[in-house]
Amino acid sequence: MRARLEMELGDVPGQLVKVLEPISRFGGNIQSVLHQRERKTPLGRIPVTVIFEVDERAKLNRIVATLRKMGIHIIQIGEREGMVKSTILLVGHIIHTDVRDTIDRLNALKGVMVSDLSLAMGAVGEESAARVTIAAADDARAKAALLKLGEIAAKKKLLMIKLLGER
Amino acid sequence: MMKLALIGFGNLGRGFSRVLLEKAKFLRNYGLTPRVIAAVDEYGAAIDEDGLDLKKLLKLAEKRGAVTAYPKAKKGKLALDVIEKVNADIVFELTPTNIKTGEPGLTHIKKAMLAGRHVVTSNKGPLVVAFRELDRLARRQGVEFRYSASVGGATPVIGLAKKLLAANEVHAIRGVLNGTTNYILTRMSKEGAPFDVVLREAQELGIAEKDPTLDIEGTDTASKITILANAILGMDAKLKDVKVAGIRRIRPEAIRLAQEAGYTIKLIGVAKRDLLEVGPRLVPLGHPLAVGGTLNAVTFETDLAREVTITGFGAGPRETSSALLGDLIDIHRSLGG
């Protein structure tokens, strides 16, 4: 998932490095840092927004707990859309059953996007295989997307291969 | 002395007999001296209440393809007769599996229990057709009933869950339970060869049967899931309750796409209280269930121990004899031996 932390830091040297360290240490992969010196608060603090990828909520919790323990003032914790990823394989007449329609119907779901599709064509008349990556805003939406794809696959007679442990 | 009757004397019956000979001295450490007093196949029965000469029986049966070659053997369909009248302590039901009717194994097992004999079987048929009925009958008759060899072959799947994990509640069972399909998928992933080519190779090696339908359509895995659901989750499940997809549509390109993303494709059976299912699944490379070749692997998800995975060899008369002989020793112990 992509996490977004809004914080206020004191205007003294070394503050930014101090907050980035635990994010990296607990497995966060920093995507961007927004340091807004021009928007200094009345108390003279500087708003900083850090966006990072992290693969487990437990890790995000640990990062937040550590920052709080360090006395960092956290204004808001947000999770950005598109960060629960599911990989699915499809086998069947994927193109002839209108792959465009398959993708459009998934994209039509709220908070769901087909973020990657790799296709391996079979010989003429034979079935093809596709690997689909679906990005969803959260677990519930990811589940809904898989359910939808299951319905589409059943109608289009595609074999849907899900991850071990996924329903 | 423990008197055994072997019902079914094909590959498995013979393999088990060979292991009994090989392990005779070893078994005495357990205070166990098993004697095979009857061996039955579809042509007849070799019977000797004092114990058959197993070496001789194996030699003759191998040469002539039937137990009737043994001195004074009787001809005809004699399984039920032997089960009822010959004074065996344990009946080993080792006839071929019929998952539709469970027969003839089902009748053999019931008759044996009604005659007050303990039963050990490798036969999935009776277990998918009438597990609860047989379980109840064994209790009512006060006889021991073991079927370790029916799932996992040499890999002690049932024993692990029922005995060693006895303190746990098992939430889910997931596994690679069919060596043939796992061999095919492994070869396809390593060689990029098409399904039909790999299937033919497996048939030539004797890994796949001439009619491989039950394996590749997932039915064999579904049978094992049914047995595990009954034996370990305490369900009253039948084969038809399992949602099944096989591996016939898996193409090498599909496996390649999976590998590019860090996965492999395995035929996975799942038993949960609200879901019985068999089908191809993406398994992360390096996951304990991502076993190669003809291996079996099963993961139990439990409340205390969390996840426990066991891996080992499935099919093969010698490997399966490990489970059959283990059941014999287990019964011997249960009876205070």
Image (tube, rainbow, N blue to C red):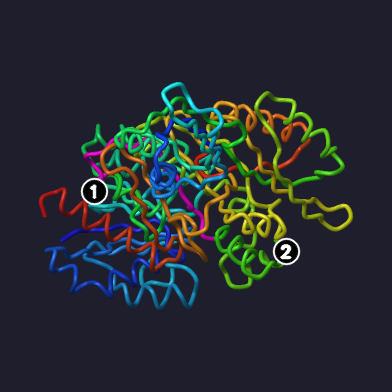
> Which quarter shows the N terminus of chain B?
bottom left
Tell me which numbered mark, 2 or 1, is placed earlier along the sequence.
1
The local secondary structure at tag 1 comes to helix
Magenta residue span: B162-179
In magenta stretch: residue B169: yes
- Residue at mark 2: chain: B
Circle 1: residue type: Leu
Circle 2: residue type: Pro
Q: Position of residue B167 (x, y in %)?
A: 21, 39
Camera-nearest residue between B197 and A2: A2
Q: Which residue is denoted by mark 1 in the rendering?
A: B164
Q: Position of residue A43 (x, y in %)?
A: 41, 23
Q: Which residue is denoted by mark 2 in the rendering?
A: B194
| Above-or-below relation of A122 to B304 | below
| Above-or-below relation of A72 to B42 | above
Q: Position of residue A49 (x, y in %)?
A: 52, 34
Camera-nearest residue between B106 and A32: A32
